[in-house]
Image (spheres, grey):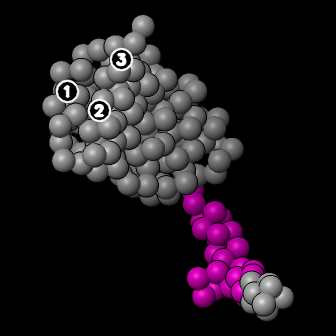
Amino acid sequence: MFRRTFLAFAGAAAALRTKVLGQSRGELNRMAEEQLAATPFKAEAIMSLDVGGLASVLQDPAATDFAKAKACQRLAVVGDESAVPALEALLGSARLSHYARTALEPLPGAAADAALRGSLRTLDGPLLVGVIHSIGVRRDREAIGALAPLRYVADSQVADAATWAIHRIRRP
């Protein structure tokens, strides 16, 4: 029985190795290479841009999600308050919200706090949980009033995140 099970798993692994979602691995690699070749933004070029250039990548409709994610990663290192509006616009994106929050969390100044607090009113579900977490990481004392009612919402993940954020903000 063990041998039969092992052989079944081995056969499934071999099939999975050659096919991923109905396409061969070579075809998927070729598609990824074509997309990377077609994008006007390369990772090396993005990493060498200044804050204004990175913000323009985030606002460019021709930029791929990859380029926008790379720009957010770079803004986490070199960003300032001038990039906050471009990052705030991405907080509602299911694919890029995490990258935008990663860039907002280390930014100095109150603009990032205001952007995160403002998105509490417009987001829900997992995106709201992420923003609440970022507020807790930044320890924004002004957000406690907005977080307090969220502790009692029906969504348990939102309620737990709000409780965690309030405790983190109040801790010394």
Check disc 1 and give the amino acid type: Ala
User: Considering only order in the chain, which callout, 1 or 2, is on the residue closer to the N terminus?
Assistant: 1
| Position of 115 relative to 36 (above/below) | above
Q: Which mark is residue 162?
A: 2
Q: Which mark is residue 167?
A: none
Check disc 3 and give the amino acid type: Ile
For the N terminus, give its image quadrant. Answer: bottom right
Q: What stretch is highlighted in magenta?
A: 12-40
Question: What residue is rendered at 42% in x and 7% in y?
Answer: 172
Q: Is mark 2 on a helix, strand or loop?
A: helix
- Asked whether residue 107 appears in the rendered view, the answer is yes
Front one among 45 and 22: 22
Which residue has dot 1 on it? 148
Q: Where is residue 142 in the image (x, y as percent from the top left)?
A: 24, 16
Front one among 16 and 47: 16
Which residue has dot 3 on it? 169
> Residue 38 lies in what quarter of the image?
bottom right
Residue 14 inside the magenta-drawn segment: yes
Q: Position of 112 compared to 99: left or right? A: left
- Asked whether residue 84 appears in the rendered view, the answer is no
**Distance from label 3 to label 1 (Cα)?**
12 Å
User: Considering only order in the chain, which callout, 1 or 3, is on the residue closer to the N terminus?
Assistant: 1
> Residue 168 lies in what quarter of the image?
top left
Q: Main secondary structure of the magenta part?
A: helix
Question: What residue is rendered at 56% in x and 25% in y?
Answer: 78
**Distance from label 3 to label 2 (Cα)?**
10 Å
Tag 3: Cα neighbours inside 10 Å, few (<14), some, or many (≥20)? some
User: Considering only order in the chain, which callout, 2 or 3, is on the residue closer to the N terminus?
Assistant: 2
Q: What element carries label 3?
A: helix
| Position of 137 relative to 130 (above/below) | above
Check disc 2 and give the amino acid type: Ala
